[in-house]
Image (spheres, helix red, strand yellow):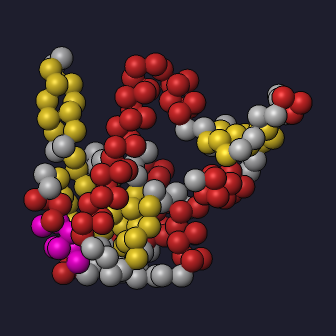
């Protein structure tokens, strides 16, 4: 449950989740559990329908299966990112490290392998929504600048700004020597630093 300002008043609103999953039993299990946890849930069972619905509704999060009839989950992941800043949690039977890395570098917020526990799914959803809430609030109270600052990662002397895709050293003699990275380089470095 999140809160939103409607006509100046804070009102509790259900977070909206879109599940794109072709295995009916799994989709229903996820839906039942999430509805009990006060989420508003929509299920689509093909990639094409998933994209259509994602574009039509304002979802807070998408749960995405990779192996889908029609448009694949991998393609859908790209398309959802073109719509806007919606966190996507991939749930897949693909357990290979390459599949995970590809999905994460491709913009997935998280990756869960099947079989999974719905409690774990709920925890991961909560983490993503909390993150989104925090950055939205930071953006509201202090402008886009502080939102950007919050996303910076520091490990040892190394600092990465994933928004500007700049990496710099915190050592005094190396100050002001930021290096601009490609999208892929920045994504890999961010993954390693996290
Ligand atoms: Ca599937």
Q: Nearer the viewer, residue 16 or 118?
A: 118
**Residue 76 at x, y = what percent?**
43, 65
**Residue 26 at x, y = what percent?**
23, 78
- Say which residue appears at 58% left-offset and 69% top-offset: 101
> Residue furthest toward the right?
173
**Residue 141 at x, y = what percent?**
40, 19
- Say which residue appears at 43% left-offset and 35% top-offset: 135
Is residue 52 shown in magenta? no
**Which quadrant of the structure image shows residue 23?**
bottom left
**Residue 144 at x, y = what percent?**
51, 25
Is residue 31 shown in magenta? yes
Prevailing secondary structure of the magenta residues: helix
Q: Is residue 25 left or right of residue 52?
A: left
In the displayed structure, would residue 61 be above or below residue 144? Answer: below
Q: Is residue 154 left or right of residue 74?
A: right
- Say which residue appears at 65% left-offset and 41% top-offset: 154
**Which quadrant of the structure image shows residue 166?**
top right
Residue 103 visible in the displayed image: yes
Segment colored magenta: 26-32
In the displayed structure, would residue 138 be above or below residue 34? Answer: above
């Amino acid at each position: 449950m999140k809160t939103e300002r409607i006509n100046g008043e804070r009102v509790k609103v259900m977070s909206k989740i879109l599940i794109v999953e072709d295995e009916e039993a799994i989709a229903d299990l996820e839906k039942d559990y999430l509805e009990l946890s006060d989420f508003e849930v929509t299920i689509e069972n093909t990639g094409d329908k998933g994209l259509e619905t994602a574009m039509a509704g304002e979802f807070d999060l998408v749960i995405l299966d990779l192996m889908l009839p029609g448009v694949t989950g991998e393609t859908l992941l790209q398309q959802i990112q073109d719509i806007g800043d919606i966190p996507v949690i991939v749930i897949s039977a693909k357990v290979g490290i390459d599949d995970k890395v590809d999905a994460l570098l491709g913009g997935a917020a998280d990756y869960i392998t099947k079989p999974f526990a719905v409690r774990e799914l709920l925890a991961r959803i909560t983490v993503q929504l909390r993150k989104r809430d925090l950055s939205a609030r930071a953006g509201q109270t202090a402008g886009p600048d502080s939102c950007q600052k919050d996303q910076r990662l520091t490990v040892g002397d190394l600092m990465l700004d994933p928004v500007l895709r700049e990496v710099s050293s915190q050592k005094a003699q190396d100050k002001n020597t930021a290096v601009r990275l490609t999208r892929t380089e920045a994504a890999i470095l961010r993954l390693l630093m996290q």
